[in-house]
Image (tube, rainbow, N blue to C red):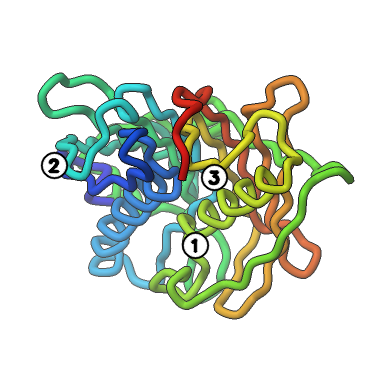
Amino acid sequence: MQLFYFTVFLLCIIACVHNANLPGNVNLYSINRIMVEMGRSISLTYQKDKYKNMSAVMLAQRYRVFETFHKRAALVYPLYMDGKIIGRSRSSYIGQLTLSEVDTGNVALVATLKIVCIDEVTKRSKTLPEDMFKEITVPFFSNLGEIFPPVFAEKEPASSFGSSVEVQPSDTDFQNHTAHSAYMKFALDGIAKAAREGVLSGIKDDVCFYRGHTEATIHMGESFIGDVLTVKVWENQEIPLQIHCSIQKNGERIYYSEICFYPRENNNAKL
């Protein structure tokens, strides 16, 4: 929890820039990995030392990536990361991470995360210790939907494009579960395959040429090394640059994301 209490530190992002002709096209997988895995590891390290048998598990997340992030992203892009808790309930809380440019102060990215406290022994939700919040006053909401609108997982249509992926050791976290950022990678790969097959009208070529705008994700299950997952992709018929992705394990959905992209700026660039 230390991260969300008082940490404001300088972060130099090593951005995943795909093509020299398109500076700033940062893969959403890289963004997710930076924001979630770094923040989560710092907070969990603190928790493990103080609170035994307690884990923080992410239920859902929302991202907003501003154009300044894409326009200025480079191999070294100095940013401040500011983290805080903006609301909590009995056993969950909403954390918000903001990246701001060091030189201009402009907000580059905002990530809002819904986290639930889990008892590692019973595997059930666990009441948050009151002393976790003694250093900071945060609003208490019995319904966190007031500050984090629910992410509704749409049912994949019959026309959705399907592909499969096998979870690799490099896709897992320290608990041996598939990492949050790995699911985003699977989703983006599924979108790339769908675009290559010509089934998407909004994305005509590789998805790496399209800059991420917003993303909403909900986690409904878990997977492990060796699991073969089915990735379903479809687009919003009214908003073609809004892509939906559902990931299934043994026919059951374990992940859903809704990703919106900025229009492609450079139609002449090629891989």
Looking at this view, is 257 or 270 the one in front? 270
- In the picture, measured across the screen, residue 116 lies left or right of residue 49, that is right
**The image quarter in which residue 122 lies:** bottom right
Residue for point 45% across, 25% down: 266
**Crowd tier of the residue under label 1, counting other residues whose Cα lies within 10 Å: few below 14, some 14–19, many 20 or above:** many
Which amino acid is tagged 2?
Phe
- In the picture, measured across the screen, residue 221 lies left or right of residue 89, that is right
Residue for point 38% across, 53% down: 33
Q: Residue tagged by mark 3?
A: 60
Looking at this view, is 154 or 198 the one in front? 198
Which amino acid is tagged 1?
Ile
Q: CA distance from mark 1 to mark 3?
A: 15 Å
Residue for point 77% across, 70% down: 250
Of all residues shown, which one is farthest toward the right?
158
Is the residue 228 above or below the residue 1 in the image?
below
Classify mark 1: helix, strand or loop: strand
Q: Position of residue 72 (x, y in %)?
A: 25, 28
Q: Nearer the viewer, mark 1 or mark 3?
A: 3
Q: Residue tagged by mark 2?
A: 9
Which amino acid is tagged 3?
Ala
Classify mark 2: helix, strand or loop: strand
Q: Nearer the viewer, mark 1 or mark 2?
A: 2
Q: Position of residue 28 (x, y in %)?
A: 44, 43
Q: Position of residue 240 (x, y in %)?
A: 68, 26
Q: Residue tagged by mark 1?
A: 118
Q: Which mark is residue 242?
A: none
